[in-house]
Image (cartoon, helix red, strand yellow):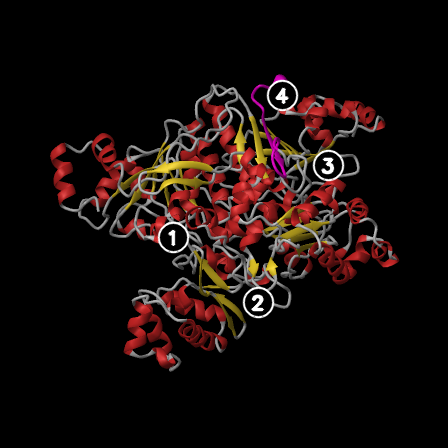
Amino acid sequence: MNPEPPPVPLPHPNGPLAGYRVLDFADEKGQLCTRLLAELGADVIKVEPREGDPTRHNGPFFRGEAGPNTSLYWWAMNAGKRSVTCELRLEPGRELARKLAAQADVVVETFPPGRAAEMGLDYRTLSSLNPGVIVVSVTNFGQTGPYRNMLATDIVGSAMGGHMHLNGDPEHGPVRTTAPQAYAQVNAQAAVGATVALYARGVNGGIGQHVDVSMQEAMANAMDNAQQTWDIRQINISGPGIRRNVAGIQGPRYLYETADGWVTCLQIGGLQGLQANVAIDWLAEQGEAGDLDSPEWRTKLSALMPLEEGERTLVEETLARFCRSRKKEELVAEAQRRGFGWAPVFGPREIVESKQLGARDFWVWVRHEDLGESFLYPGPAFRFSETPAMHRGRAPHIGEHNAQVYGELLDLDAADLRRLKMRLVL
Amino acid sequence: MTPPKRNQTLEKPFRGLRVADMAWVGVGPTVSKYLADHGAEVIRVESSTYPEALRRVGPFVDDEPGIDRSGYYANFNSSKLGMSVNLKHPRGPELVKRLVAECDVVTESFTPGTLARFGLDYEQLRQVRPDLLMISMPLYGQTGPWASYMGYGHVLQAASGYNHLTGWPDGPPIGTGIAYTDFLVPHFAAVALIAALDYRRRTGKGQYLDFGQMEAAIHGLGTAILDWTANGHEQSRMGNRDPEAAPHGCYRCKDGKYVVIACFTEKDWERFKAALGRPEWCDLERMRRRWQRLNEQKEIDWHLSMYCAEMRSSTVFRVMQEFGVPCGIVRSPEALQNDPQMRHRKHYWMLKHPVMGDRTYDSPSFKLSKTPAELTKAAPLLGEDNEYVYRDLIGLSEEEFISLLADGAFE
């Protein structure tokens, strides 16, 4: 006998944002934002067109089979939300959406600038119905300005936000992180904007406001010290490959191959820096310090004296040889034991199998009763002592919560919903 | 520079909240910068005996290293006050405790256990401030075999998948060129902290947040984790390609700058063909559908490289956008300063620092219409506000202040 399937989403009355309602009209630029709010306890309602949200067609798909409920993108970004359908191409649909927004604390939308106003779903209209509403508008470049209508995807955001300029290597030019970072950044930063606005509302007598978020600016905020390096030193940092930039000066290698992959470490693993003797001792104990195990080198490296190109290569090569015959996790454990902040290069599989995350009970099994299987998901990014965050189960099917949401919020019954369906609104 | 004033009649959101910011480097200070730029009184708790790492890293003004000269440090610490205290002085921990008694929030990012050694962990701090909200945000969290592991964002990006997913498919996992996670995870931490603040505002209850940077970083990996756990497929770095789009790449133009072009939909592709003037290769049968084009990326990239090599980046950008194709220029830091959109948005603030002069500071990517961020001042000098903190907040007498000062307690 099958056990009762868990409710979708799982209730979460103890989260810090429990009691808030969020309406989600977002594409890739806002779905993670609202998912984070759901994990903090908010009731997030995803509004989809009748045929389903376009991101349901984003790959990859479960077992490689495309379908409305098999997109892993959809699973990842919309877990823990409720779903209603509502046809925003029709005025009755827009009217329905406005009624939902009248009962929402936060609306997250990613329409091109001006589109929300055409549909009567902009801050001005919604706040006239609900003065407390917070409308978070996430766009490529912001609501105003010369580029407001420019088209963008993740790579365009990464490029126009300057971040790509810092990545890559001199031979190939700039590179994008294959997992989309402009989207990740703008989502996380939009969520900050949403929570600041919620707090502001609380201390300002319940008055909401409009939050205008730019993907370009979100990426520009991920430029390390490159902007200040330009401002102060007039140097444009660009992708250093396996090396590091230190405020515009090319530093040594930070990436070394091991017997089973790669490790990363700064300051040539510690061979250059105040603790250089400790690092040289480590290599010397294994008989692999080579020339470095000499008073001259020890002084030179621990006093951080400038190295000539050939000298730096020699130190890097010494470490490279040392790493090549050893396993990355063992290297990292030993380096850490001796006080050096190394880390292994992990791929998805190693992350999932990581002892650290396992020991912290990070992973969550999420039941997909529709597929008769459960899958391992990353647990929430935050741990609270009093108001826990929670993964709230699988992403919803198209309009899975129509009856529930429209009944609860707008008091519509089955006959009303049937009528709306016949009019192609739901 | 000030942001446009629209209905600016409401209180700054965090006005009246006081934050003791014991965190350092990138993550913690970025979190408290959000609070400071939106009205909180944030006090950086530092020491000259163990200076904040970023104060020792450049760029330094005039290339002269100095504790109050780093642009790196400055950018993350706008709108904040600065105090200094020597925790190793016999009275250091007590002074911090007395400060915390006057604070709503404590942020920190030490290796787990460090603050407990000084009697400054959450359990002890809540004794002096029962409604305290405290967040700890080291790399790997408070527990587990890696809890004491050290490192910076340069290496955390490796442990959390960003190296594996950045670079060319036949090359090493170079990762981003920067301490990437330092610029991703603070936003997650800020969301958690502000949500907990809102809960505290409504209920009066503080709490403790055990934030592990790696756990947040993993949420920026898109579908990579689920693709492994559900499909057993390990995603890997693809250069500038995308599993879903063709063309999708980065191309060098005549002026030496790079442009990026992405076509996800058939509509994008049709517009792209029009933008190029429908060259013959575009209309080949094997270019007709997206799944076909995904197999022809080498050829598409070759044609696009030739096309871009003949054109200026600004021309490619303009033409593509006019035809409705997602396209951008890879902005250098310099170009970003002059980018008309960034200027319109007033992203960069110019703040006057007593030692560093007028310097560029980042501001939030979100603009609140009624309570916008305001970067009220440049980064603090080390210990700049000691007198205010020790005399006015903690309430030391003139005598005590002088004697502790002379005794090195504020170093």
Q: Nearer the viewer, residue A313 or A62?
A: A313
Disc assigned to residue A400: 3
Q: Earlier in the sequence, mark 3 or mark 4?
A: 4
Numbered disc in front, either 3 or 4: 4
Q: CA distance from mark 2 to mark 4?
A: 50 Å
- Mark 4: few, some, or many residues within 10 Å (few <14, many ≥20)? some
- Mark 3: few, some, or many residues within 10 Å (few <14, many ≥20)? some
Residue at x-position 46% and y-position 55%: B153
Relative side of A53 to B289, left or right: left
Could you tell me which chain the residue with mark 4 belongs to? A
Q: Are marks 3 and 2 on the same chain?
A: no
Quarter of the image where one finds residue A133: top right
Q: CA distance from mark 3 to mark 4?
A: 30 Å
Q: Is residue B82 magenta?
A: no
* Label 1 close to label 2 by CB (< 8 Å): no
> Given the image, on which type of amino acid does mark 2 rest?
Pro
Residue at x-position 41% and y-position 67%: A269
The residue indicated by pointer 4 is A124
Q: CA distance from mark 1 to mark 2?
A: 28 Å
Q: Is residue A134 magenta?
A: yes
Q: Which residues lie in the magenta part?
A: A127-145
* Label 2 close to label 4 by CB (< 8 Å): no
> Given the image, on which type of amino acid does mark 1 rest?
Gly
Q: Nearer the viewer, residue A228 or B157?
A: A228
> Given the image, on which type of amino acid does mark 4 rest?
Arg
Question: Which secondary structure lies at badge 3?
Answer: loop
Quarter of the image where one finds residue A423: top right
Q: Is residue A72 visible?
A: no
